[in-house]
Image: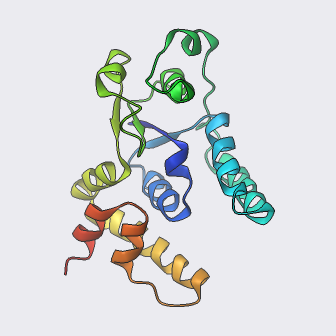
Amino acid sequence: MKVLIDACVLFPTVLREIVLGVAATGAFRPLWSPRLLEEWARAAAKAGAAAEAMARGEIAVLRAAWPDAEVRPRDGDLARLWLPDANDVHVLAAAVAGSADLILTANARDFPRHILAEEGLDRRAPDELLMDLWLADSAAVAAVVARVHAEAERLAGAPLAPRALLKRARLPRLAKALYPR
C-alpha cells in the first residue's frame, strides 16, 4: 500500500516518528512531495531558526532513508484537479503522480472522499490508519510506539505518560488501545 503523507502528519515530531516507524516495518510505503517537505520546514520555522534548521536536517535524513518516496506532481494534474482548498491540490496531484492508495491527513474537510475516489484514492486520518495497522500487527505497532516514547522521554529528560503523549500527537484511539486504563 502506498500512502502519501500530508505535511500536517510530517510535522509534529511524535506523530511523524510513529507513522514513519510503522512504515519502516513494511506496513506501507510512504510518499511525499518536495512541497510537502518544504511545508514541514516552514511550519517548524515558526518556532525559530534553530527549529527550522533541525527540520531541514531531519528532512535530509528522511530523503536519504527513503530515496524512492519523493514524488513530483505533474503540471497536467495540477491544472485539472480540484479540491475545496486550492492550496491542497498539490497534495492530491502528488498522490496521483505517485500512484498512492490513500492520502494520510488530519485535514478531512479539504479532502472529500468522493473527489478522491474519482482518482482511485482514499483518505485516512493517522489515528485511523495506525489503528487498522495495529489490528493487523499489534506487536509491530506497539514496538514502534515504545521506541518513540522512550526517545521522547530521553529528549525531555523526564518521564512522560505514554497515553498522554499519544493523545497530544492526535492518536487518541491508538492511545486507548495500547494503554487501556
Quadrant of the image for the N terminus? top left
Is 63 or 167 nearer to us in this picture? 167
The percent position of residue 73, horizontal first and vertical second, equals 60, 22
Quadrant of the image for the C terminus? bottom left
Vertical relation: 139 (above or below) 24: below
The percent position of residue 58, horizontal first and vertical second, equals 69, 57
The colour scheme of the drawn protein is: rainbow
The percent position of residue 113, horizontal first and vertical second, equals 30, 27
The image quarter containing residue 145 is: bottom left
The percent position of residue 93, horizontal first and vertical second, equals 53, 22
Is 110 or 65 nearer to us in this picture? 110
- How many numbered circles are shown? 0
Residue lying furthest bottom in this view? Answer: 158
The residue depicted at 54 percent of the width and 59 percent of the height is 12
Vertical relation: 35 (above or below) 48: above
Vertical relation: 105 (above or below) 77: below
The image quarter containing residue 105 is: top left
The residue depicted at 52 percent of the width and 83 percent of the height is 153
Is 13 or 108 nearer to us in this picture? 108
Residue lying furthest left in this view? Answer: 181
The residue depicted at 42 percent of the width and 68 percent of the height is 168
Quick check: 113 left or right of 33?
left
Quick check: 158 left or right of 179?
right
Quick check: 139 left or right of 55?
left
The image quarter containing residue 25 is: bottom left
